[in-house]
Image: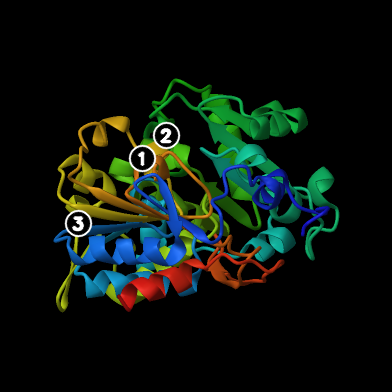
Amino acid sequence: EIKEIFSACRMGVSRFVNNSDRIESNKGIINGENVDIDNAINKAKEILNNSENILLFGWANSTLEAQKKGIELAKKYSAYLDDTSSFCQGITLDAIMKNKNKIKTCTLDEVRNKADLIIYWGADPSNSHPRHLSKYSYFPRGELRQRGWEEERTMITLDVRESHTATLCKEKDPDHFYEIPPHDDHQFINALLQIMDGKVPKYNKIDKKRLFKLYSTLKKAEFGVIFVGLGLVHSIKNNFDILLQLMDKLNAISEFYLIPMVGHYNMRGFNQTLFETTGYINRVKFDRNEVKHGIEYSVIELLKNKSVDAMLCIGSDPYASLPRSIFKEKGDKIKIIVINPANTLTSKVSEVVIPSAISGIECSGTAIRMDGVKVELQKVIDSQYLSDEEIIDRLIKG
């Protein structure tokens, strides 16, 4: 029993204490009725065995061990396999994994010890990653930054509005926050590239003097890091190469590194595991000995086009995170199986719900952080819940 929690951020605390929607450990759900957990798993096997086009979706909140089992399951059923990176940080992670020798990245520990310039672009870690600033980027003393944020670190936020993180930046210097109009990041980056080429930028939505001041700050950095948020990703997703051009230019005059602000704790783990297995980070279809990849195999396209007749959803809530129009006419065509610690909007419309243990609290495993570092998750309390890995393993053996 957990009585008190120390040294966790507000999100960490919620993982321990927010149990109001937990499903009973020895109970599964079939068509809204509580059943024995074994019956729920057997029903899930039955659905998978009787389906022709299966989508396995989620995975970003599962351990590496469960993710590897998920790839096995996808191979067994010649299934589609996708995760939430398909509509968020996938483009950043794909670029990093495919261009290891070209795109410079670093660890969060290196940021803490060396970084003198931290840029949050399209991200608000004060709310999305509450301990990011205090543990790794801005506030801590590092090996080479003993005088910390007061003297040796500069933090800049670029965003469409003044976030809590942007307010922190402005308190130190008003020119440490740049409000970029929605979808203008491409033009903003292009303006910086023009300045680096010795030209006067044509971009007129931000004072040119401020743009030149930003360039001066970038040029003086000894160890700079750009944390790429979803705001930037969605703004430049059709021309992501312009960010890589900026990184090339910055590294010609200084040292700059790129880290994606991944939201789910093991999204990068899934992308890396799948990449090592198939050469792709998401949106794949296993077809006997062949692996297919393309936008048409993304969760959004598959559901929108009614291309699947069954979906196994693990550690994700697509009914809450995807456009409702995708599910509007689901009817009885798509059978949904949910593996999750708690009830969600998706579980409420599912044929089968299988409760699972919370990784890092009720079961152990490994994961990969946003910076690519593998971490061990230790079990804190004993639990009767099956882990994701155990559940998937039983489905494989079905």
Asked if the residue under mark 2 is in contact with the one under mark 1, i.e. CB atoms within 8 Å, the reply is yes
At a point 60% along the width and 37% down the height, the residue shown is 124
Residue indicated by mark 2: 185
Q: Along the line of sight, which residue is nearer the eye, 194 or 52?
A: 52
Q: Along the line of sight, which residue is nearer the eye, 115 or 276?
A: 276
In the picture, the disc for residue 236 is: 1
Q: In this picture, is 304 found above or below 23? A: above
The amino acid pointed to by label 2 is Asp
Residue indicated by mark 3: 294
The answer for how far apart the CA atoms under marks 1 and 2 are is: 7 Å
Q: Is residue 163 left or right of residue 55?
A: right
Q: Along the line of sight, which residue is nearer the eye, 382 or 268?
A: 382
**Residue 387, how many percent across, how many down?**
52, 68
Q: In this picture, is 387 found above or below 220? A: below
- Sequence-wise, the earlier of marks 1 and 3 is 1
At a point 24% along the width and 60% down the height, the residue shown is 47
Circle nearer the viewer, 3 or 2: 3
- Sequence-wise, the earlier of marks 3 and 2 is 2
